[in-house]
Amino acid sequence: MLKWFFVSFAALALLTRASLSQTMGSVSGTVMDQAGKPINGIWVTAVRTALPPASGAATSDATGLFLIQNLPAGPYKICAQSPSWQYLDPCFWTDPVAGAAFPASIIASKTTTVPVKLQSAAKLQIRVNDPQQLLGPAHPERDVAVDVLTPARVYFRARLASQDPAGRTMEVPIPSDRELRVLVTPTQVSLVDATNTAVPGAGTIMAVTHPGAATAPALVTFTVSAAQ
């Protein structure tokens, strides 16, 4: 009886696995830059845009190829993150009103092909001068937080690019030739901007545009005036 139970359980597990495989699909494609050159090492995510939620991820190889398997059938959007922030993630930098930049319809037992062409990112740098050395060495976002409002209506947080005794530089990828809103929030120090105007504790919002012809990053400067 016990043997029959184990055999039945194993058979049920195989049937369940086979049934699930028939309801799952895959998405594949090649990640390229605007010139059509394949990009290696891009973290590609397929995110379902309907309920119930589902997602899967893979990294593009040396030929730019990626394959994400075992996705429940349905509509998806394809996101692509560059670890070096050299390229813009379409899920952050595409206006959702216009629809997903790279939509994918996953069909059970089939592989959907979606070519992904990424836009190169410009850089916004935020320099925080610290003549009194009041900034802490760890968790820089706890002293000063910098967030860019993206077309996807979400805030993209800048990360630390470098730190030295005179201050720190934070960096965030942005598109060129597009006016963006940047929120700078001092959390544990007081700041003044380049005109020596105090930044409110709730933060200040400024407009920033990186000209497409410019090669240097857009730069915004603040100075730590006191500890809070």
Image (tube, rainbow, N blue to C red):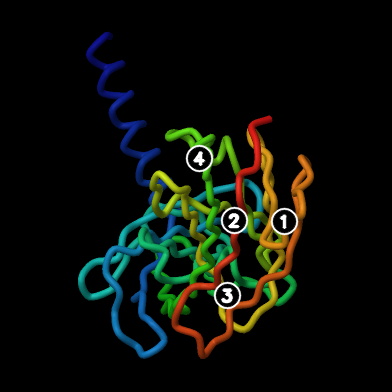
| Crowding at mark 3 (Cα within 10 Å: few <14, some 14-19, many 20+) | some
Q: Position of residue 198 (x, y in %)?
A: 76, 49
Q: Position of residue 19 (x, y in %)?
A: 42, 46
- Contact, mark 1 vs mark 3 (Cβ under 8 Å): no
Q: CA distance from mark 1 to mark 4?
A: 22 Å
Between 178 and 37, the one nearer to me in the picture: 178
The C terminus - image quarter:
top right
**Above/below status of 46 relative to 63:** above
**Label ID, residue 156:** 2
Lower sequence index among marks 1 and 4: 4
**Above/below status of 119 relative to 203:** below
Between 27 and 124, the one nearer to me in the picture: 124
Residue in view at x 68 percent, y 40 percent:
190
Q: Nearer the viewer, mark 2 or mark 3?
A: 2
Q: CA distance from mark 1 to mark 2?
A: 26 Å
Element on which disc 1 rests: loop
**Label ID, residue 196:** 1
- Contact, mark 1 vs mark 4 (Cβ under 8 Å): no
- The residue that mark 3 highlights is 101
- The residue that mark 4 highlights is 140
Between 200 and 92, the one nearer to me in the picture: 200
Element on which disc 4 rests: helix
The type of residue carrying mark 2 is Phe
The type of residue carrying mark 1 is Asn
Q: CA distance from mark 2 to mark 3?
A: 18 Å
Q: Nearer the viewer, mark 1 or mark 3?
A: 1
The N terminus - image quarter:
top left
The type of residue carrying mark 4 is Pro
